[in-house]
Image: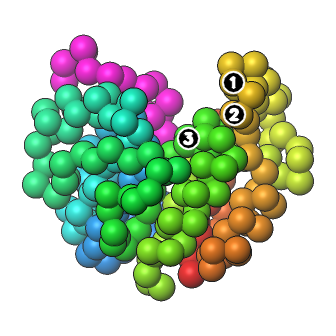
């Protein structure tokens, strides 16, 4: 693969452990909406490994160009053309999907954007579907590691709206839109994979 493609080392490190869990969850044919495709390393890796899925990449209009080159190079038959998606701006460009995957987005969005993401997913997610949210999370206000504490401080110094979200806050938010935090999987580097279902 060419070296001039947008690249994230953390995506490269976590894509295999995430895939192990997604294989168990995305276990039937359907469409996966990915919120925040980024460099498209996850999209290409997961879509290639799970050909029974249609993978719908999306990203914020200001960042959507980053995922195009890798998606075009991979040219997978089950990867749909990337769409611009600002979670806080209706209407969403995708009306229906079976599953949702999003990695490392909740801590860079403003809380109001996190609320809108859950609201729109809760409104559209079918009963057999699931919303998988990956990233670092606090538990009852406590950091899971000193690394996450330092990362949170870095985020807040970069922009006041950013920061590691708390599991209890996300679980409460999910309940307001008809979702339940049904699984909470430990991932490498003090991250988690949260699975929300109707």
Up the image or down, 76 lies above or below 151; here it is below
Query: Picture coordinates of residue 38 (x, y %)?
Result: 39, 35
Circle nearer the viewer, 1 or 3:
1
Q: Pick the residue in front: 136 or 178.
A: 178
Residue 122 shows in the view: yes
Up the image or down, 31 lies above or below 13; here it is below
Q: Is residue 119 left or right of residue 102?
A: right
Up the image or down, 75 lies above or below 55; here it is above
Question: Of callouts 1 and 3, which one flags the residue occurring earlier in the amino acid sequence?
Answer: 3
Q: Residue 162 carries which label?
A: 2
Question: Residue 152 in magenta?
Answer: no
Q: Which residue is drawn at 29% across and 67% down?
A: 31
Secondary element at tag 2: loop
Please state the total of marks drawn on the protein image: 3
Q: Quadrant of residue 105?
A: top right
In the displayed image of the protein, which residue is found farthest to the top? 4
Query: Picture coordinates of residue 189 (x, y %)?
Result: 64, 36
Q: Residue at x 55, y 41 (%)?
A: 104
Q: Mark 3 points at which residue?
A: 104
Q: Quadrant of the N terminus?
A: top left
Q: How crowded is mark 1: few (under 14 residues within 10 Å), some or many (20 or more)?
A: few
Query: Picture coordinates of residue 26 (x, y %)?
Result: 39, 69
| Label 2–label 1 contact, CB within 8 A | yes
Q: What stretch is highlighted in magenta?
A: 1-18
Q: Which mark is residue 42?
A: none
| Label 3–label 2 contact, CB within 8 A | no
Q: Which residue is drawn at 89% across and 44% down?
A: 142
Q: Colour scheme used in the picture?
A: rainbow
Q: Is residue 41 left or right of residue 112?
A: left
Question: Of callouts 3 and 2, which one flags the residue occurring earlier in the amino acid sequence?
Answer: 3
The alpha-carbon separation of the residues under discs 1 and 3 comes to 16 Å
Q: Residue 159 carries which label?
A: 1
């Amino acid at each position: 693969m060419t070296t001039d493609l947008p690249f994230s080392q953390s995506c490269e490190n976590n894509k295999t452990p995430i895939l192990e869990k997604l294989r168990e969850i995305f276990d039937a044919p359907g469409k996966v909406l990915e919120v925040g495709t980024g460099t498209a390393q996850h999209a290409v890796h997961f879509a290639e490994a799970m050909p029974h899925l249609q993978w719908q990449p999306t990203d914020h209009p200001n960042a959507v160009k980053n995922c195009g080159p890798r998606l075009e190079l991979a040219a997978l038959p089950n990867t749909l053309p990337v769409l611009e998606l600002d979670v806080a701006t209706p209407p969403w460009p995708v009306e229906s999907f079976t599953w949702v995957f999003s990695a490392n987005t909740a801590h860079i969005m403003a809380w109001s954007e996190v609320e809108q993401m859950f609201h729109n997913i809760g409104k559209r997610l079918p009963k057999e579907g699931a919303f998988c949210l990956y990233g670092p999370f606090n538990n009852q206000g406590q950091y899971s590691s000193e690394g996450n504490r330092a990362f949170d401080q870095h985020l807040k110094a970069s922009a006041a709206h950013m920061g590691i979200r708390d599991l209890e806050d996300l679980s409460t938010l999910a309940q307001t839109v008809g979702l339940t935090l049904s699984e909470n999987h430990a991932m490498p580097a003090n991250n988690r994979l949260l699975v929300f279902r109707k």
